[in-house]
Image (cartoon, helix red, strand yellow):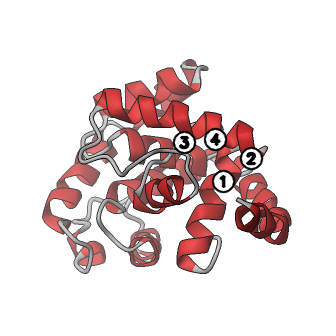
């Protein structure tokens, strides 16, 4: 546990600055953040970010273009291109929900139900990246470190909705125990695995 606290003290300033950056992301960038989170399942985050930069360059949001060219190197790109096209068609509805639903968990639930290709993990990831707080992004880095530091007993075989919420609550308990907010713990665990603080 001391190792974790020590790592946090080293990275605390940078982690807080990153979260502050997320909270200042303009609403017009939400579309591409959602594209990024649709691309990330079972894929390299840096590659996904590179694909999104290409989509921005090609003005995917404004133009009627096929996203395939930009995301061809991403795993399951055919499915993900379909999800992105569907999300683009209903983005006005997504924006409206984000304006109207004030509760974080309720908004995450709405995204899971209404945006294809987005699970609890990806919707929490998207919301964190645009400034929302206190939702767990239970990816393999987080789960592995929760096991390592005793936050959970073992890696879940599958992440059903019930299991996701159960582990999220355990993550919040662990976060209180080590006195590090879960959003900061998330970036800390990720950086300890990947060697940098990303998104």
Residue 194 appears in which quarter of the rendering? bottom right
The secondary element bearing badge 3 is classed as helix
> Mark 1 sits on what residue?
185
Q: Residues within 10 Å of mark 4 (few under 14, many from 20)?
A: many
Answer with left or right where residue 2 lies relative to residue 56.
right
Mark 2 in CB contact with mark 1 (< 8 angstroms)? yes
Q: On residue 127, which mark appears?
A: 3
Image coordinates of residue 50 in percent, x first then y, are 44, 78
Q: Nearer the viewer, residue 99 or 134?
A: 134
Q: CA distance from mark 3 to mark 1?
A: 16 Å
Residue 99 appears in which quarter of the rendering? top right
If you read the primary sequence from the N terminus, does the residue marked by circle 3 or circle 2 appear first? 3
Mark 3 in CB contact with mark 2 (< 8 angstroms)? no
Q: On residue 174, which mark appears?
A: 4
Q: Residues within 10 Å of mark 1 (few under 14, many from 20)?
A: many
Q: CA distance from mark 3 to mark 2?
A: 24 Å
Residue at 65% x, 71% y: name it: 197
Q: Quadrant of the N terminus?
A: bottom right
Image coordinates of residue 150 in percent, x first then y, are 55, 50
> Mark 2 sits on what residue?
178
Residue at 45% x, 54% y: name it: 143
The secondary element bearing badge 1 is classed as helix
Q: Residues within 10 Å of mark 3 (few under 14, many from 20)?
A: many
Q: Nearer the viewer, mark 3 or mark 1?
A: 1
């Amino acid at each position: 546990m001391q190792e974790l606290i020590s790592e946090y003290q080293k990275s605390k300033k940078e982690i807080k600055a990153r979260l502050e950056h997320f909270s200042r992301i303009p609403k017009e960038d939400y579309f591409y953040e959602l594209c990024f989170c649709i691309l990330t399942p079972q894929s390299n985050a840096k590659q996904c970010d590179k694909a999104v930069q290409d989509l921005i360059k090609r003005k995917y949001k404004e133009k009627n273009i096929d996203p395939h060219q930009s995301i061809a190197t991403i795993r399951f790109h055919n499915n993900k291109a379909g999800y992105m096209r569907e999300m683009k068609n209903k983005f006005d509805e997504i924006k409206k929900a984000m304006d109207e639903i004030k509760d974080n968990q309720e908004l995450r639930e709405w995204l899971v139900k209404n945006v294809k290709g987005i699970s609890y993990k990806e919707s929490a990831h998207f919301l964190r990246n645009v400034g929302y707080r206190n939702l767990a992004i239970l990816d393999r880095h987080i789960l592995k470190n929760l096991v390592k530091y005793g936050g959970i007993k073992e890696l879940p075989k599958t992440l059903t909705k019930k299991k996701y919420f159960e582990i999220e609550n355990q993550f919040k308990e662990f976060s209180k125990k080590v006195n590090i907010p879960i959003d900061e713990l998330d970036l800390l665990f990720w950086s300890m695995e990947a060697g940098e603080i990303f998104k």
